[in-house]
Image (tube, rainbow, N blue to C red):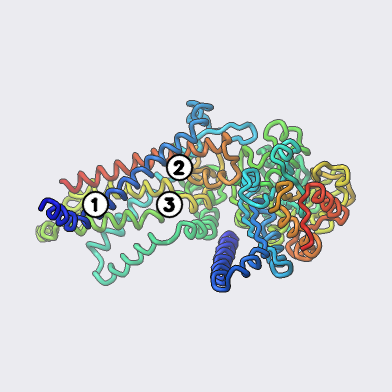
């Protein structure tokens, strides 16, 4: 009797047990990979951390001849380019998303939405090549000389737009990143705008509010957090972008005020130096340490994004 | 450039996999007698120098057709070549720089050269054409260390009286990835400028004080092409393919030399191959008539007394015998005959000469 019951129980539940086991296994597996990755990066990078200590973050030298390495130049390059990217992408994607959901006729907006989503599917190396062959000459011939003669002559901010106008550098890299993250932030914002109840907007319009007033007083207050969340999500992507940046940033270990100067990002530095670094060497260890730092930054940024988005949903 | 080579690699790879599958299925279908037949087609793998990549890949095509040796060469960089041959994960490693005797004996490796190449100094200045501009080693060192900032600097105009140089910023361009090309170029600067030797030295990548970095020869070439006022260094073949404006360099005798296949061959012939150990010759700034000063040799490393190495030797023996034409069309300079003879003896000595099969 008991045996029969057990048999019945197993028969009924075998699929369920197998399924839940498989799903659990997958989840644990991904978590393990994630933890192992973090551990491995720090473990491999320990030699760099121990050898250079705080110098690793303070100095800006990268000298394979004397075996001196540090993270600061690449760290600053990473942050500056990604912040430029976000700063340019924010108004761009806000405008795109707002016009697509609120202003344009639905047929046109559907076509444009598809076009923007397609932009997200373009491999980053394509952006790199496009940036190198199209954007760099444009920057060196028109944009940078223009900025240099206008903004470059102003006090304080003039330093940001000084130096040689060679086309490559942090500004160009930031612009490429802006174009690359715009589709993501646009998609997040589009969803957000579509979720604002039509009733609210229509009542505002019926009270005689202009488009600006509706956007400023009705739509924006409801969506602040979700927009910030979307932007931070795009920022996370900009931080880790490698190939497109490598093409246009100029790959130099410099720290300077000018945005025209060539610089470096962590991801692009790792990609460049990895093949020629002897395994077990100090350079390889420094690259691993840089990888660990990049991972930490991305982790913090993405965590903030999730937190903001979650809070926005709750409200 | 990159895309092309990558796609070629991918296609080659897929092709080989398909071949393998076909070979495997035929083995299964026909039976045991086929296995011995399949084993006869030797397959060797190599990793290393990007500089020698096009040469080895083209040689591999020829060798597969004529002697049935299948070579899979991955141009991942000299550093990767060294790492992987030491850990013996590949049949041969290819490097643009000679390896020290201690390292060779410690890892039981044999080193031999395969071809010679030149490094061109290229510029992008309006109205300056091929071989019009003259430069010297110390001037290039000053440009790359930021002491000379404009093309109309007196030091440059002094030796270029017959060309007009305008007031243009110099944009020095270098290889951002570690590379044998940088090693050779910086070794040249070390020899030419005392100051450079003390401050920066030579390595596969160094701490450049200023300038813009490009990834690979191709990227440096297109940066020079793209950026007005730039100066860069690339392999000879890339300078020709991209129609870049090369400069003349002053040799140790005070003559200005243009980079051509002849001036490369002149450098290759003058080198002291006979007395060199492990073919470790210094071709930089060599004293000789019409010899280009920045010349590099590309090497191959194989394990001594190893069955796999025999396949490698079979491949390179064919290449030395029949591959000179291919090398010339790709703008490499083949080794002089007496060097090839010396390499043959080295193989014998290391016990990796293939049996006549």
First in sequence: mark 2 vs mark 1: 1
Residues packed near mark 3 inside 10 Å, few (<14), some (14 to 19) or many (20 plus) = many
Judging depth in this view, the residue of B195 and A308 nearest the camera is A308
What SS does tag 3 mark?
helix
Q: Secondary structure at mark 2?
A: helix
Whichever of callouts 1 and 3 sits on the residue coming sooner in the sequence is 1
Q: Mark 2 near mark 1, Cβ–Cβ under 8 Å?
A: no
The circle drawn on residue A177 is 3
What is the chain identity of the residue bearing mark 3?
A
Mark 1: secondary structure:
helix
Mark 2 — on which chain does it sit? A
> Which residue is painted at 10% across and 53% down in the image?
A1
Alpha-carbon span between mark 1 and mark 3: 41 Å
Q: In which chain is the residue bearing label 1?
A: A
Which residue is depicted at the point 49% across and 36% down?
Answer: A44
Q: Which circle, 2 or 1, is nearer the viewer?
A: 1
Q: Which residue is mark 2?
A: A78
* Res B229 seen here: no
Mark 2 to mark 3 CA distance (whole Å): 11 Å
């Amino acid at each position: 009797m008991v045996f029969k019951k057990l048999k019945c129980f197993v028969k009924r539940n075998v699929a369920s047990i197998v399924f839940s086991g498989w799903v659990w296994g997958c989840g644990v597996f991904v978590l393990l990979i994630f933890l192992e990755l973090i551990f491995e990066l720090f473990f491999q990078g320990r030699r760099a951390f121990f050898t250079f200590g705080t110098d690793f973050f303070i100095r800006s030298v990268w000298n394979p001849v004397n075996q001196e390495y540090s993270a600061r130049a690449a760290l600053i390059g990473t942050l500056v380019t990604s912040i430029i990217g976000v700063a340019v992408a924010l108004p761009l994607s806000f405008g795109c998303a707002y016009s697509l959901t609120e202003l344009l006729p639905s047929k046109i907006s559907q076509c444009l939405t598809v076009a923007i989503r397609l932009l997200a599917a373009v491999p980053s190396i394509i952006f790199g090549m496009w940036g190198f062959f199209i954007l760099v000459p444009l920057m060196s011939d028109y944009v940078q000389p223009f900025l240099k003669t206008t903004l470059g002559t102003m006090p304080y901010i003039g330093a940001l737009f000084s130096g040689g106008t060679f086309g490559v550098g942090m500004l160009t890299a930031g612009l490429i990143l802006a174009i690359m993250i715009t589709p993501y932030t646009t998609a997040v914002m589009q969803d957000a705008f579509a979720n604002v109840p039509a009733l609210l907007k229509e009542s505002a319009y019926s009270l005689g509010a202009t488009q600006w007033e509706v956007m400023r007083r009705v739509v924006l207050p409801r969506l602040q957090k979700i927009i910030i969340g979307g932007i931070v999500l795009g920022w996370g992507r900009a931080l880790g972008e490698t190939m497109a940046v490598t093409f246009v940033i100029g790959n130099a270990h410099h720290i300077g005020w000018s945005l025209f100067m060539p610089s470096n990002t962590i991801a692009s530095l790792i990609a460049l130096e990895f093949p020629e670094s002897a395994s077990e060497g100090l350079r390889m260890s420094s690259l691993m340490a840089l990888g660990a730092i990049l991972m930490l930054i991305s982790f913090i940024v993405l965590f903030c994004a999730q937190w903001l988005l979650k809070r926005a949903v709750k409200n | 450039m990159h895309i092309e080579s990558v796609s070629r690699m991918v296609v080659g790879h897929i092709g080989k996999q398909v071949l393998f599958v076909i070979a495997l299925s035929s083995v299964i279908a026909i039976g045991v007698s086929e296995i011995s037949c399949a084993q006869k087609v030797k397959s060797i793998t190599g990793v290393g120098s990007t500089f020698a990549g096009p040469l080895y890949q083209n040689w591999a095509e020829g060798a597969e057709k004529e002697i049935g040796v299948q070579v899979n060469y991955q141009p991942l960089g000299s550093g990767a070549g060294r790492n992987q041959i030491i850990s013996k994960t590949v049949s041969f490693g290819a490097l643009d720089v000679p390896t020290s005797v201690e390292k060779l004996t410690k890892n039981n490796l044999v080193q031999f050269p395969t071809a010679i190449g030149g490094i061109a100094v290229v510029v992008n200045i309006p109205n300056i054409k091929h071989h019009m501009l003259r430069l010297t080693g110390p001037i290039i060192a000053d440009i790359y260390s930021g002491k000379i900032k404009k093309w109309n600097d007196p030091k440059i105009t002094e030796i270029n009286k017959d060309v007009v140089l305008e007031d243009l910023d110099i944009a020095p361009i270098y290889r951002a990835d570690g590379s044998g090309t940088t090693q050779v170029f910086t070794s040249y600067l070390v020899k030419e400028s005392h100051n450079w030797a003390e401050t920066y030295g030579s390595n596969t990548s160094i701490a450049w004080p200023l300038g813009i970095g490009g990834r690979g020869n191709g990227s440096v070439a297109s940066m020079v092409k793209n950026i007005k006022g730039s100066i860069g260094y690339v392999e000879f073949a890339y300078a020709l393919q991209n129609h870049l404006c090369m400069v003349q360099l002053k040799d140790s005798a005070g003559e200005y030399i243009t980079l051509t296949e002849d001036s490369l061959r002149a450098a290759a012939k003058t080198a002291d191959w006979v007395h060199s150990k492990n073919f470790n010759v210094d071709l930089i700034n060599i004293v000789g008539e019409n010899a280009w000063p920045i010349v590099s040799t590309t090497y191959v490393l194989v394990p001594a007394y190893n069955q796999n190495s025999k396949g490698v030797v079979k491949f390179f023996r064919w290449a030395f015998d029949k591959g000179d034409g291919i090398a010339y069309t790709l703008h490499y300079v083949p080794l002089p005959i007496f060097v090839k003879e010396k390499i043959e003896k080295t193989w014998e000595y290391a016990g990796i000469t293939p049996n006549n099969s």
